[in-house]
Amino acid sequence: MNYNEILDEIEKQLEGEAHLDELARKKQDPFKILISTILSARTKDANTRIATERLFAKYDTPKEIAEADIEEIEQLVKSSGFYKVKAARIKEVSQVLIDKYNSIVPENYEELMSLPGVGSKTANCVLVYAFKVPAIPVDTHVHRISNRLGWVETKNPLQTEKVLRDTIPKEFWLKLNRLFVRFGQQICIPIRPKCEICSLNEVCPKDFSMEIAMRSKKKK
């Protein structure tokens, strides 16, 4: 099966939509998508959704967040986990947006990467979900599934992003993260993936070597 056929098969199996999908559908607010992506680090979509909704119900501009009391921001985003670090980060990012970008989220990778605490995944998420610019945000789901499918043989998300950019036709970049995140949440889950109900079961090489190597490394 080619890339398009595999992505189509994945999409047929999925239910609902991921949090960033939901934000992009309701209103393409680059600032909200940027902040929500920062809040999403090391937590589940449901927790990110709660934190984002609580924060933006009270403060929804860079100026409001930059001027808000840090303790109050911490309480608003507490459900996202690591809330003290995240609260400080989004306050700092908001101030930089005011100082350098007239409160407007930049629309290119290099400037997004210059923001405090913004890495490749976050920058690419903003490009894809806020601006519809072709990019490949690689989170734990994209990294895991790409290895299981045999599309890459990589040890970390940055390596995965590079290989995918070099091999996946650009026409598929916008949909790849959107599909793989939900696929990784619903079927190709980290532990005991539901291969028996997956329509790719017979064609998937089920390459778990990256995960086995990671588990072995943790035991040492």
Image: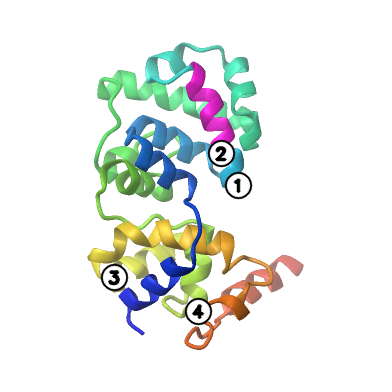
Q: Return the residue nearer the eye: 122 or 75.
A: 75
Q: Quadrant of residue 34?
A: top left
Q: Quadrant of residue 46?
A: top right
Give how far apart the Cα atoms at labels 3 and 4 are. 27 Å
Up-down relation of residue 215 to residue 116 (above or below): below
Is residue 198 visible to us here? yes
Residue at x 55% of width, y 82% of height: 206
Residues at badges 1 and 2 in contact (C-beta under 8 Å)? yes
Going by the numbered disc 2, the residue's amino acid type is Thr
Up-down relation of residue 47 to residue 201 (above or below): above
Up-down relation of residue 94 to residue 154 (above or below): above
Is 50 one of the magenta-colored residues? yes
What is the chief secondary structure element of the magenta stretch? helix
User: Bounds of the magenta span?
Assistant: 48-58
Question: Which one is in front in this view, the residue at disc 4 or the one at disc 1?
Answer: 4
Label 4 vs 1, first from the N-terminus: 1
Give the structural element (helix, strand or loop) at label 2: helix
Question: Which one is in front in this view, the residue at disc 2 or the one at disc 3?
Answer: 2
Label 4 vs 2, first from the N-terminus: 2
Would you say 101 lies left or right of 217 here?
A: left
Q: Position of residue 179 (x, y in %)?
A: 43, 61
Give how far apart the Cα atoms at labels 1 and 3 are. 29 Å
- Determine which residue is flagged by label 1: 44
Give residue 166's mark. 3
Give the structural element (helix, strand or loop) at label 4: loop
Residue at x 60% of width, y 16% of height: 72
Give how far apart the Cα atoms at labels 4 and 1 are. 25 Å
Going by the numbered disc 4, the residue's amino acid type is Ser
Residue lying at the far right of the rendered structure: 219
Give residue 48's mark. 2
